[in-house]
Amino acid sequence: MPTLVNYSGKDELRNESAFCANSMVNVDVFGSACKRARISAPFVLWDQESEQATRSSINVLPDECLFEIFRRMAGKERSISACVSKQWLTLLSRIRRAEICNNDTAMVSEDKEVDGCLTRSVEGKKATDTRLAAIAVGTAARGGLGKLSIRGSNSTHGVTNAGLLAIARGCPSLKSLSLWNVSSIGDEGLSEVAKECHMLEKLDFSQCPSITNKGLIAIAENCPNLTTLSIESCPRIGNDSMQAIAQGCPKLESISIKDCPLVGDQGLASLFSSNSSIVSKVKLQNLNISDFSLVVIGHYGKSITSLTLSNLKNVTERGFSVMGNAQGLKALVSLSISSCFGVTDFSIEAIGKGCSALKQIYLRNGCFMSDNGILAFSKSAEALESMHLEGCNRITLPGLVAALSSCSFKFRSLSLVKCMGLKDVSFQGSLLLYPCISLRCLSIKNCPAFGSAGLSILGKMCPSLRQVDLSGLYGMSDEGIISLLESSVAGLAKLNLSGCINLSDESVLAVARLHGETIKELNLDGCRKISDMSLVVISDSCPLLNDLDVSNSAVTDSGIAALSCSEQLNLQILSISGCSRISNKSLPYLIQLGKSLVGLNLQHCNSLSSSGVDMLMGNLWKCDILC
């Protein structure tokens, strides 16, 4: 005991235990870890009276004196001091980097702060001013804070401007700031960030009703390195701040604005008409803008490579047409348009002609676009590689076949989702004279009227398919699947038939026979007629298969046994979720398969006992098991 009391090493108890005893915060600081006392009575290692006197002597100093002491400390010493009390933490968080004395050689290491290598994220109950103050003090000596994300806020002691002020003063290396659903942070905190964090590059606001044009203008005037700006559901941000960003942030490359009713044509025109504009990525969603904004984008968006336009109710056919005909979007590679009534046959053709570098297009809820528009677009978009059509109900099978016949040799991927006009129809084979031999990926999902006849036609149109997704086509039969498989001469690598409830083992037998040497991923989730016969064939004929999903099917223990006995199969992911006929008899077979498995889904396998699953988890400790 005397040895313990008189110990005077670097971890001396009387120093750091005092810090821990009064610690208010233990986040991002260098204080030693504290153990909870086993009894409520105080345990004193030295004279309590002298300790109290020491405490009183330091606490009688005014904040000004403590401030002068703290700013002369090295970084780790300041971090440890922050553990003493909330008062000390608050004082330390008010010290700006420029106010820290660099007299001591130990301070040289703090120059590393400009690197900004650290990332911190606070959410929900952990998002408080005290936590932000601790981050500001603690990260200073560890390389500097570069990225901060605040999502939500504590309901009683949430984040306010005071917390953001602490970050601004203590973290001048901050490069990325994200604020989501933080109603109590406003212009005061954001202005302080603008004043102190001149290296700021990325700014992301969402549901911040207290931030107005004033705060964003301060950013524009003090942060010339800003490259990315994202604003969502901020009702008090409008055109004035957009004009300031256009003038003060010449390096801006990406901008996203959503649900901001005060942002209109005037603000967007300032952003895109600036001669120094190098904006390459643009997202405009649910804004009160007119054709004028799209005309400006079409004329001045020479650097734009990715453009997303969603729910622009006031933009008409003229706006989209002029945007395409303006010939300014020569660099545009990816275009996404969703729920915009101005997308018609005429305007989509103009976009195809004017955007000569366009490779990817995503069209959702294009209710005024028909077969004529898709055909004209396919003919004019010579660089097109990928097309996604969702909720485009005026697109029919003959129109789709005609468009595929007209696509360029670069076209690789086609996806159709919830297109109700896609139905089985009979038409002359002359339309199949020009197959799309370049198409590699075909996805047709949740199109209830599309059936086997249509799939047979598309199979003949697209003989080079490597990936096929037909999920949710509950009207599909074995006949249609087999026809597609027989037409695909390149060898399928991925096949998704989930939700095709009418398929039987015949389809799987065809997969194994025609594409067994190339298939790598096979999804049969919800195919209720699939039985052990399919697993037996798969185990014998599919050596490259690494991902198999037979969830909610009719497979039993015998099928799992067949898989485990295969000498060539090397499964990595197996899903048998909802297979009620798989019992504890499958456990040894699953253990055998587990030699190669990294993922196993056993959810809702009601015939498997909990003890059996526990045993399985103990044996397959390298495998991620869902149960």
Image (cartoon, rainbow, N blue to C red):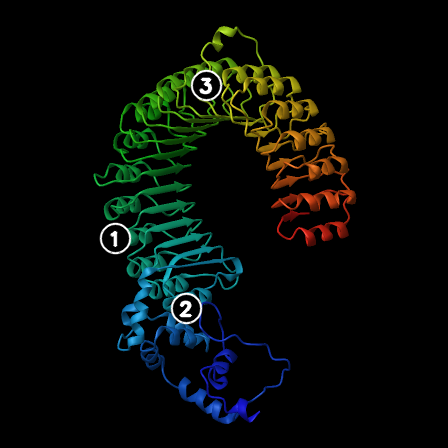
In the image, 190 versus 70, the foreground residue is: 70
Image coordinates for residue 81, horizontal then vertical, percent: 42, 77
The three-letter code of the residue at mark 1 reads Glu
Report the Cα–Cα distance between label 2 and label 1. 29 Å
Vertically, is 90 above or below 114?
Answer: below
Label ID, residue 437: 3
Q: Which residue is mark 2?
A: 138
Q: Which residue is mark 1?
A: 221
Residue lying at the far left of the rendered structure: 275
At x 48% / y 9%, what residue is drawn?
Answer: 431
Assess disc 1: are there few (<14), some (14-19) or many (≥20) residues with their C-alpha within 10 Å of its C-alpha.
some
Tell me, yes or no, if residue 96 can be seen here.
no
| Local SS, label 3 | loop
Tell whether label 1 touches label 2 (CB within 8 Å): no
The three-letter code of the residue at mark 2 reads Gly
| Local SS, label 1 | helix
Image coordinates for residue 111, horizontal then vertical, percent: 30, 67
At x 35% / y 66%, what residue is drawn?
Answer: 170
| Local SS, label 2 | helix
Q: Is residue 501 left or right of residue 407?
A: right
Vertically, is 254 above or below 166?
Answer: above
At x 54% / y 30%, what residue is drawn?
Answer: 493
